[in-house]
Image: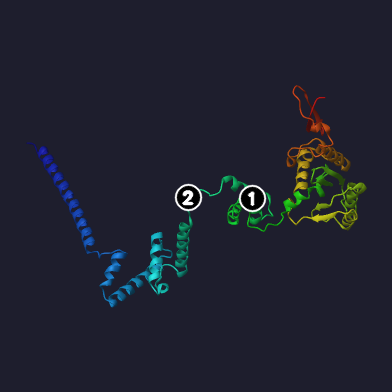
Amino acid sequence: MSAKGTHEEVGGKLMMWAAGVACLERWGVRCVLGLQHRFSHWTRPPSPGLLCGTLGDVTRSKADVIAENALLRQQLIVLRRQVKRPRVTPTDRLLLVMLARCARAWRDALLIVQPDTLLRWHRASFRLIWRAKSTTMSRTPKIPSETIALIREMAADNRLWGAERIRGELLKLGIHVSKRTVQKYMRHVRSRSTPSQTWATFLRNHARDIWACDFVQVTDWSFRSLFAFFIVDHASRRVVHVGVTRHPTDAWVAQQLREATPFGKHPRFLLRDNDSKYGAAFAQVAKISGIEVLTTPHRAPRANAICERFLGSVRRERLDHLLILHERHLDRALRAYAVYFNHDRPHQGMGQRIPDARQDGQAQSPRTAGRDIIAHPILGGLHHDYRVAA
C-alpha cells in the first residue's frame, strides 16, 4: 500500500471521530437543558386557583393568612410602580365585584383599580341584569304595524301634538292604545328639543305674507362695483322688483321699496339681513306701508335661504356668462332674467312649477301626441323655452 493511500485512510477516520464527538456534545447539551427544565418545574411552588386557595385558607391559622396577605400586598405595590394600567378581563371584573361584597374593608384592599372604577363595574352589571330581565322573549309588537306607522306619521306631521293628543285622534278612528305605547313609538320620530315652532315652519306657514330682499355685488369691465337689489316673493318665488345702482344709499333703497309696493300692494313681512344699507328711511317707508321688517341673525345665510338661492341662480345662469359694461347694461340683463325666471323657468322648490304659471296659459296646457315642440332662444341663446306648436 502506498503512503498516499495510508494518509487518506487516517484522515477519513479522524473526520468520522470528530463528527461523533460533536454529536455526543450536542446530545449532552440537550440532556442537560431538559433536566434543568424539569428540575425547575418540579421545584416551582404550586399556584392554586381562587377556589382552591380559599378552601386551603380555612385550615390555616389567622397569623399565617395575615402574613401571606402582607407579602402579597407588598408584591402588588412593587408591580404597581411598573405597570400603570393592568389588563383586566370581564371575568376578573365580575370576581372583583363579587369579592368586594364579602369584604368590609374592600376600599383599602383595592390596589390595581380605584374604588370608583369598581362601583362603575357594579352599576354596569346591574344594568345588564335588569335589561335581560325586562326584555321579553318575543320581540313581535303587540299592536299592528299599520298602527305603528300611523302613530309615527301623526307625530311627524303634527309637531305640536303630544302623546295624549295623538291617542285621542286614534280613538276617533277606533284604535285603542295606551299613552305609553304612543310615547314609545313617538320617540323615534320626535327630537328631544322643545316642541316649538322652527324657523323653517314659520316661513312655510307664512310664505304668502313674506317677501325677501337682498343685494348682489357685480364687478364691471373696469373693475368698478355695481349693486343689484332684488325682492322675491316667498310663496310663488316670483321676482317682485329689480334695481341697480353704483351707490346703494339708504334713500335709494327706500325708493326701491316704494316702487315695489305701488297702490297699497305689500306683504305683511319683509325679510332682510343686517346690511348697513337698510337705514332709517327704509324702516320709515316699511312702517308707513304696514310692513313688518324681520332681520335675520348674524352669519346665518340659511335664514334667508330663498333669496340666497335666487341670487345663486342669477350668478350661475346669467352674470357668470356676461361682461358687464355699465349700470344700464346690468339693469337690462337682470330685468330680462327676471322675466325669464317668472314666466319660463321651472322652480325645484315648487315641484318644477313656474312662478307665474297661472298668468301664462301655455304653461298649463298639456302636451298632445303628434304636435311639434318649438324651442325659443332666451337671453341671447343662453337658455331656451320649449313650447308646443299652435
Query: On the image, numbered disc 2 is attached to which residue?
Result: 138
Mark 1, Cα crowd under 10 Å, few <14 / some 14-19 / many 20+, is: some
Q: Amino acid at mark 1?
A: Leu
| 89 relative position to 330: left or right | left
**Vertical relation: 307 (above or below) 49:** above
Query: On the image, numbered disc 1 is attached to which residue?
Result: 170
> Percent position (x, y) of residue 256?
89, 49
Q: How many marks?
A: 2
> Percent position (x, y) of residue 247?
87, 50
**Vertical relation: 294 (above or below) 111:** above
Secondary element under disc 2, as helix, strand or loop, is loop
**Vertical relation: 173 (above or below) 368:** below
Q: Earlier in the sequence, mark 2 or mark 1?
A: 2
Q: Mark 2 or 1, which is nearer the eye?
A: 1
Marks 2/1: CA distance?
A: 25 Å
Secondary element under disc 1, as helix, strand or loop, is helix
> Percent position (x, y) of residue 174?
63, 48
Q: Residue 32: name its quadrant.
A: bottom left
